[in-house]
Image (cartoon, helix red, strand yellow):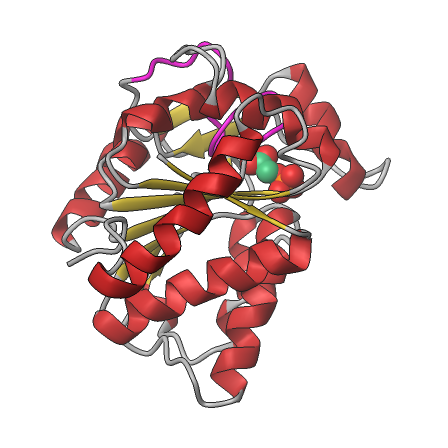
Amino acid sequence: MEVIIAKDADAVAELGAQLVCELLNKKPEAVMGLTTGSTPIALYQKLIQRHQQGEASFRAITTFNLDEYIGMTADNPQSYRSFMNRELFDQIDILKANTHVPSCGLEDNPRAIGAAYERAISVAGGIDLQILGIGSNGHIGFNEPCSSLSSRTRMKILTESTVNDNSRLFSAEEFQPHLAVTMGIASILESRRVTLLATGAHKAEAVRDAIEGPLSARCQASALQMHERATFIIDEAAASCLEYGDYFRWANSENTPIIEKFGNFYELD
Ligand code: PGA
């Protein structure tokens, strides 16, 4: 596991953008796993800037988002499809037909949607780089505490803590869904590389449990300990509960000349 502790949220986004652009340079037709939430917005801003400066093209990529609320139509501004269009897709040269969100209407069978989503990822060749955030309860995607660590794309009922965390984004009269379709932990672990971004002190305990805690369904992000190429990019505040924080800082400085000479093991060949 690679743990990079950056100065602040802007530096986290910058490192995330560098990683995405390195992938695009190597593989313009990459398959990317994307996420929503407050954390990736700064990363998406940096990608949009790079695109506007002619430094990055998304024309050939395919994307799969982690999750979507059940019963949210794509045109609902609260849907994750709308979020992605607004925060990224409408501002870059991506082909919308190549962007996927696990949309599930109230009349749709979530089991069928989940299986079809898994098939679509597999037909696209699997995900090269999955970007993740982390919930304050340790969830990745909407895999809530005590989800199976072998889970696949399916329906999840959100915990009260997640509903409360997300309530800031809904006005009092707005419908806030409690059901979602999410890629599973096994689906996420199949990505060739995963990068989790976390910023802020409110994520510090979840980050500690994910990186240093026991592998446990209680902290879903701890499953990334089992991934060969998992990188955490976190700011100082999110790193503030780590027992091994100084070790990670030291390891990064020791690694720098090795990476310069041989490349980063975590990069895809
Ligand atoms: P946030 O959400 O980026 O809005 O904090 C992260 C998550 O719940 O996965």
Give the extent of the magenta segment: 135-149
Q: Name the image quarter holding residue 184.
A: top left
The C terminus - image quarter: bottom left
Above or below, comparing residue 198 to residue 52 in the picture: above
Quarter of image, res 167: top right
Measured from the top left, where is residue 172 in percent x and y? 86, 35
Quadrant location of the N terminus in the rendered image: top left
Q: Residue sitting at 57 percent across and 79 percent down?
A: 49
Which residue is at a point 60% across and 64% down the rendered structure image?
87
The total number of labels drawn is 0
Hey, which residue is sitting farthest right in the picture? 172
Q: Main secondary structure of the magenta part?
A: loop
- The spot of residue 152 in percent (x, y) is 28, 26
**From the viewer's perspective, is 199 left or right of 113?**
right
Image quadrant where residue 194 sits: top left
Q: Is residue 169 above or below residue 153?
A: below
Horizontal side of 35 relative to 183 (left or right) equals right
Above or below: residue 269 compared with residue 22: above
> Percent position (x, y) of residue 229?
28, 41
The residue depicted at 67 percent of the width and 41 percent of the height is 236
* 231 displayed left or right of 188: right
Q: Give the residue furthest to the bottom.
A: 54
Image region (quadrant) for ligand 1: top right
Q: Is residue 166 visible?
A: yes
> Image check: 248 left or right of 245?
left
Is residue 174 a member of the stretch shown in magenta? Answer: no
Residue 163 picture location, percent across and down? 68, 25
Q: Nearer the viewer, residue 56 or 78?
A: 56
**From this viewpoint, is residue 28 visible?**
no
